[in-house]
Amino acid sequence: MTRLRLAVAGLVALVALVALPACSSSSPNSERARATTTAASNSGDSDGTVKLDTGKNYGDKYADGILPVGDNKYTTDAPKQGYVYVCRAPIGGGGAMTRGPWFVNNNTKYDMNKKVAVEGDVQWDASYSMSIDGDTRVIETNDLPRDHTTGVFPVQPSDPAYQYDRNPNSIAAQSLTYRLDASPTVGRSPSCVGGESGVMTTGVALFDAFDAGGRDAGAWEVQDGCDGHPQMSDEYHYHTLSSASRTRRCAR
Protein backbone atom coordinates (compact mmCIF):
# COMPACT_ATOMS: atom_id res chain seq x y z
CA MET A 1 0.00 0.00 0.00
CA THR A 2 1.40 3.36 -0.97
CA ARG A 3 1.78 5.79 1.91
CA LEU A 4 2.27 9.48 1.37
CA ARG A 5 4.72 11.35 3.55
CA LEU A 6 4.03 15.04 3.91
CA ALA A 7 7.26 16.55 5.16
CA VAL A 8 8.13 19.62 7.13
CA ALA A 9 9.09 22.71 5.17
CA GLY A 10 12.28 22.80 7.18
CA LEU A 11 13.51 19.45 5.86
CA VAL A 12 16.69 19.83 3.91
CA ALA A 13 16.14 18.29 0.47
CA LEU A 14 16.55 14.53 0.86
CA VAL A 15 17.47 14.12 4.50
CA ALA A 16 15.43 15.34 7.46
CA LEU A 17 17.55 16.52 10.33
CA VAL A 18 14.78 16.22 12.90
CA ALA A 19 13.50 13.22 14.85
CA LEU A 20 10.32 11.21 15.01
CA PRO A 21 8.54 8.98 17.46
CA ALA A 22 9.83 5.56 17.94
CA CYS A 23 10.07 2.28 16.20
CA SER A 24 10.31 -1.08 17.85
CA SER A 25 11.41 -4.49 16.72
CA SER A 26 8.28 -6.03 18.17
CA SER A 27 5.66 -3.53 19.27
CA PRO A 28 2.55 -3.21 17.06
CA ASN A 29 2.03 0.32 18.41
CA SER A 30 5.21 1.73 16.90
CA GLU A 31 4.66 5.24 15.57
CA ARG A 32 4.49 5.31 11.79
CA ALA A 33 4.44 8.13 9.27
CA ARG A 34 2.23 11.03 10.23
CA ALA A 35 1.19 14.17 8.42
CA THR A 36 1.16 16.14 11.66
CA THR A 37 4.68 17.33 11.01
CA THR A 38 3.47 19.61 8.23
CA ALA A 39 4.96 22.92 9.13
CA ALA A 40 4.50 26.35 9.23
CA SER A 41 6.03 29.49 8.17
CA ASN A 42 9.55 30.27 7.17
CA SER A 43 12.29 32.02 9.08
CA GLY A 44 15.99 31.84 9.90
CA ASP A 45 17.23 35.04 8.37
CA SER A 46 14.64 37.49 7.09
CA ASP A 47 14.30 35.47 3.91
CA GLY A 48 14.16 32.14 5.76
CA THR A 49 17.49 30.81 4.52
CA VAL A 50 20.09 28.94 6.55
CA LYS A 51 23.58 30.40 6.46
CA LEU A 52 26.74 28.72 7.72
CA ASP A 53 30.10 30.35 8.20
CA THR A 54 32.19 28.42 5.68
CA GLY A 55 35.37 29.81 7.20
CA LYS A 56 34.63 28.42 10.65
CA ASN A 57 35.81 25.04 11.89
CA TYR A 58 32.76 23.64 13.68
CA GLY A 59 34.78 20.65 14.87
CA ASP A 60 33.62 17.13 15.67
CA LYS A 61 32.66 16.88 19.32
CA TYR A 62 32.13 13.12 19.14
CA ALA A 63 35.05 12.15 16.92
CA ASP A 64 36.10 9.53 19.49
CA GLY A 65 32.80 7.67 18.96
CA ILE A 66 31.64 8.09 22.57
CA LEU A 67 28.14 9.54 22.63
CA PRO A 68 25.77 10.57 25.44
CA VAL A 69 22.81 8.26 26.04
CA GLY A 70 19.58 10.12 25.29
CA ASP A 71 17.03 7.96 27.11
CA ASN A 72 13.74 9.84 27.59
CA LYS A 73 15.22 13.07 26.22
CA TYR A 74 11.98 14.15 24.61
CA THR A 75 9.27 16.66 25.35
CA THR A 76 5.67 16.77 24.14
CA ASP A 77 4.40 20.18 25.27
CA ALA A 78 7.01 22.62 23.96
CA PRO A 79 10.50 22.65 22.45
CA LYS A 80 13.39 22.43 24.90
CA GLN A 81 17.11 22.63 24.26
CA GLY A 82 18.76 19.22 24.32
CA TYR A 83 15.45 17.37 23.82
CA VAL A 84 13.41 16.13 20.87
CA TYR A 85 10.03 17.86 20.61
CA VAL A 86 7.67 15.02 19.64
CA CYS A 87 3.97 15.14 18.86
CA ARG A 88 3.35 11.93 20.77
CA ALA A 89 5.29 10.30 23.56
CA PRO A 90 6.74 6.81 22.99
CA ILE A 91 4.29 4.19 24.23
CA GLY A 92 6.57 1.40 25.37
CA GLY A 93 7.29 -2.16 24.32
CA GLY A 94 9.79 -3.91 22.08
CA GLY A 95 13.39 -3.02 21.42
CA ALA A 96 16.57 -4.47 22.84
CA MET A 97 16.26 -6.90 25.73
CA THR A 98 19.33 -5.86 27.67
CA ARG A 99 22.03 -3.22 27.87
CA GLY A 100 25.15 -4.06 25.84
CA PRO A 101 28.76 -3.84 27.08
CA TRP A 102 29.28 -0.74 24.91
CA PHE A 103 27.59 1.38 27.60
CA VAL A 104 30.25 3.30 29.56
CA ASN A 105 30.62 5.98 32.24
CA ASN A 106 27.95 4.52 34.52
CA ASN A 107 25.69 3.96 31.51
CA THR A 108 25.49 7.68 30.73
CA LYS A 109 27.38 7.24 27.44
CA TYR A 110 27.99 4.54 24.84
CA ASP A 111 31.00 3.72 22.69
CA MET A 112 30.07 3.20 19.05
CA ASN A 113 33.43 1.52 18.46
CA LYS A 114 32.53 -1.27 20.90
CA LYS A 115 28.95 -1.82 19.80
CA VAL A 116 28.14 -5.08 18.02
CA ALA A 117 26.33 -5.10 14.68
CA VAL A 118 23.93 -7.60 13.14
CA GLU A 119 25.93 -9.88 10.87
CA GLY A 120 25.35 -10.35 7.16
CA ASP A 121 26.01 -8.88 3.75
CA VAL A 122 22.69 -9.01 1.88
CA GLN A 123 22.19 -7.35 -1.52
CA TRP A 124 18.81 -5.81 -2.47
CA ASP A 125 16.99 -4.76 -5.64
CA ALA A 126 16.40 -1.12 -4.84
CA SER A 127 14.13 1.34 -6.62
CA TYR A 128 14.56 5.08 -6.12
CA SER A 129 13.68 8.24 -8.01
CA MET A 130 13.74 11.96 -7.31
CA SER A 131 12.04 14.61 -9.46
CA ILE A 132 10.95 18.24 -9.25
CA ASP A 133 7.30 19.06 -9.94
CA GLY A 134 6.87 22.80 -9.75
CA ASP A 135 7.67 23.80 -6.16
CA THR A 136 7.64 20.18 -4.95
CA ARG A 137 10.44 17.64 -4.76
CA VAL A 138 9.00 14.14 -5.17
CA ILE A 139 10.97 11.17 -3.89
CA GLU A 140 9.74 7.64 -4.51
CA THR A 141 11.50 4.62 -3.06
CA ASN A 142 10.90 0.99 -2.19
CA ASP A 143 12.98 1.63 0.97
CA LEU A 144 15.62 -0.94 0.04
CA PRO A 145 19.16 0.48 0.19
CA ARG A 146 20.42 1.29 -3.27
CA ASP A 147 24.09 1.66 -2.46
CA HIS A 148 24.87 -0.64 0.45
CA THR A 149 24.12 -4.12 1.77
CA THR A 150 22.32 -5.04 5.01
CA GLY A 151 22.63 -7.53 7.80
CA VAL A 152 20.50 -10.68 8.03
CA PHE A 153 17.09 -10.16 9.64
CA PRO A 154 15.46 -11.65 11.66
CA VAL A 155 18.55 -11.69 13.88
CA GLN A 156 19.84 -15.26 13.97
CA PRO A 157 20.50 -17.12 17.27
CA SER A 158 24.10 -17.67 16.13
CA ASP A 159 24.63 -13.91 15.73
CA PRO A 160 26.41 -12.25 18.70
CA ALA A 161 23.82 -9.46 18.47
CA TYR A 162 21.09 -11.96 19.41
CA GLN A 163 21.96 -11.88 23.12
CA TYR A 164 21.12 -8.16 23.21
CA ASP A 165 18.44 -7.56 20.56
CA ARG A 166 16.42 -10.42 19.03
CA ASN A 167 14.78 -8.35 16.31
CA PRO A 168 12.27 -10.83 14.79
CA ASN A 169 11.40 -8.70 11.76
CA SER A 170 12.38 -9.16 8.14
CA ILE A 171 13.31 -6.59 5.49
CA ALA A 172 10.79 -6.15 2.67
CA ALA A 173 10.15 -3.65 -0.11
CA GLN A 174 7.80 -0.78 0.72
CA SER A 175 6.07 1.80 -1.46
CA LEU A 176 7.00 5.21 -0.08
CA THR A 177 6.41 8.64 -1.60
CA TYR A 178 7.75 11.82 -0.04
CA ARG A 179 6.65 15.28 -1.16
CA LEU A 180 9.01 18.00 0.00
CA ASP A 181 9.43 21.68 -0.66
CA ALA A 182 11.82 21.95 -3.61
CA SER A 183 13.49 24.93 -1.91
CA PRO A 184 13.07 24.36 1.85
CA THR A 185 13.49 27.21 4.32
CA VAL A 186 13.57 27.46 8.09
CA GLY A 187 10.29 27.59 10.02
CA ARG A 188 9.54 30.70 12.08
CA SER A 189 8.91 28.56 15.15
CA PRO A 190 9.61 24.94 16.13
CA SER A 191 6.99 22.29 15.43
CA CYS A 192 6.67 18.88 17.03
CA VAL A 193 7.61 15.95 14.86
CA GLY A 194 5.87 12.64 14.34
CA GLY A 195 6.18 9.72 11.96
CA GLU A 196 9.21 9.30 9.75
CA SER A 197 11.38 12.37 9.71
CA GLY A 198 12.76 11.92 6.22
CA VAL A 199 14.53 9.76 3.69
CA MET A 200 18.24 9.38 3.10
CA THR A 201 19.85 9.48 -0.33
CA THR A 202 20.38 5.72 0.04
CA GLY A 203 16.60 5.42 -0.43
CA VAL A 204 16.07 4.31 3.18
CA ALA A 205 13.68 5.94 5.66
CA LEU A 206 15.10 7.96 8.55
CA PHE A 207 13.40 7.40 11.92
CA ASP A 208 13.99 9.30 15.12
CA ALA A 209 16.34 8.77 18.03
CA PHE A 210 14.04 6.67 20.24
CA ASP A 211 12.90 3.09 20.54
CA ALA A 212 9.27 2.38 21.44
CA GLY A 213 10.02 2.81 25.14
CA GLY A 214 11.62 6.22 24.76
CA ARG A 215 15.16 4.91 25.10
CA ASP A 216 18.02 6.04 22.88
CA ALA A 217 17.65 3.72 19.88
CA GLY A 218 21.21 4.29 18.72
CA ALA A 219 22.51 3.20 22.10
CA TRP A 220 20.17 0.31 22.89
CA GLU A 221 18.99 -1.30 19.66
CA VAL A 222 21.43 -3.33 17.59
CA GLN A 223 21.48 -2.40 13.91
CA ASP A 224 23.55 -3.80 11.07
CA GLY A 225 26.91 -2.43 10.00
CA CYS A 226 25.23 0.37 8.06
CA ASP A 227 23.12 1.33 11.08
CA GLY A 228 19.79 0.05 9.80
CA HIS A 229 17.22 -2.52 10.88
CA PRO A 230 13.54 -3.36 10.17
CA GLN A 231 10.45 -2.72 12.30
CA MET A 232 7.16 -4.63 12.49
CA SER A 233 6.03 -3.72 8.98
CA ASP A 234 9.40 -4.93 7.67
CA GLU A 235 10.41 -1.35 6.87
CA TYR A 236 14.19 -1.01 6.96
CA HIS A 237 15.28 2.31 8.48
CA TYR A 238 17.96 4.25 10.29
CA HIS A 239 17.84 6.11 13.61
CA THR A 240 21.24 7.74 13.20
CA LEU A 241 23.56 8.87 10.43
CA SER A 242 24.31 5.71 8.49
CA SER A 243 27.89 4.59 8.03
CA ALA A 244 26.79 4.00 4.42
CA SER A 245 27.90 7.60 3.91
CA ARG A 246 31.44 6.21 4.25
CA THR A 247 31.18 2.63 2.98
CA ARG A 248 28.89 0.71 0.64
CA ARG A 249 29.09 -2.59 2.50
CA CYS A 250 27.68 -3.27 5.93
CA ALA A 251 29.55 -6.38 7.00
CA ARG A 252 31.80 -5.78 10.02
Image: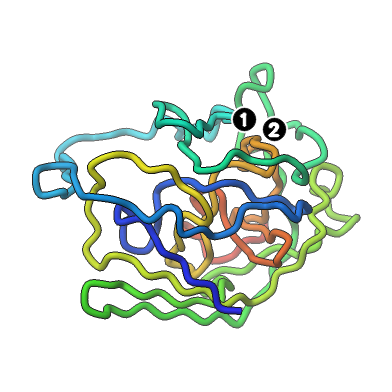
Depth check: 66 or 87 in front? Answer: 87
Return the x and y of residue 16 as percentages of the image width and height.
40, 54
Task: Spot the residue most to the right.
Answer: 157
Return the x and y of residue 232 as percentages of the image width and height.
73, 61
> Which residue is disc 2 drawn over?
102
What amino acid is found at the position of numbered circle 2 in the picture? Answer: Trp
Real-space CA distance between mark 2 and mark 1, rounded to the nearest whole angstrom: 15 Å
Around disc 2, counting alpha carbons within 10 Å, would you say few (fewer than 14), some (14 to 19), or many (20 or more)? some
Q: Specify whether residue 208 is in view.
A: yes
Return the x and y of residue 149 as percentages of the image width and height.
62, 69
Q: Secondary structure at mark 1?
A: loop
Can you say which quadrant of the picture contains the N terminus? bottom right
Return the x and y of residue 96 as percentages of the image width and height.
77, 42
Q: Residue at x 31, y 72 (%)?
A: 137
Residue 11 vs 82, above or below: the answer is below
Task: Spot the residue most to the left.
Answer: 46
Q: Residue at x 83, y 51 (%)?
A: 166
Around disc 1, counting alpha carbons within 10 Å, would you say few (fewer than 14), some (14 to 19), or many (20 or more)? some
Q: Is residue 197 left or right of residue 137?
A: right
> Which residue is disc 1 drawn over?
71
Depth check: 158 or 176 in front? Answer: 176
For the residues carrying marks 2 and 1, which lies nearer the camera in this image? 1
Q: Mark 2 or 1 closer to N-term? A: 1
Task: Spot the residue most to the top.
Answer: 106
Q: Residue at x 32, y 80 (%)?
A: 131
What amino acid is found at the position of numbered circle 1 in the picture? Answer: Asp
Q: Secondary structure at mark 2?
A: loop
Q: Specify whether residue 243 is in view.
A: no
Residue 33 vs 220, above or below: the answer is below
Q: Tell me where residue 110 sits by quadrant.
A: top right
Q: Residue at x 27, y 78 (%)?
A: 132
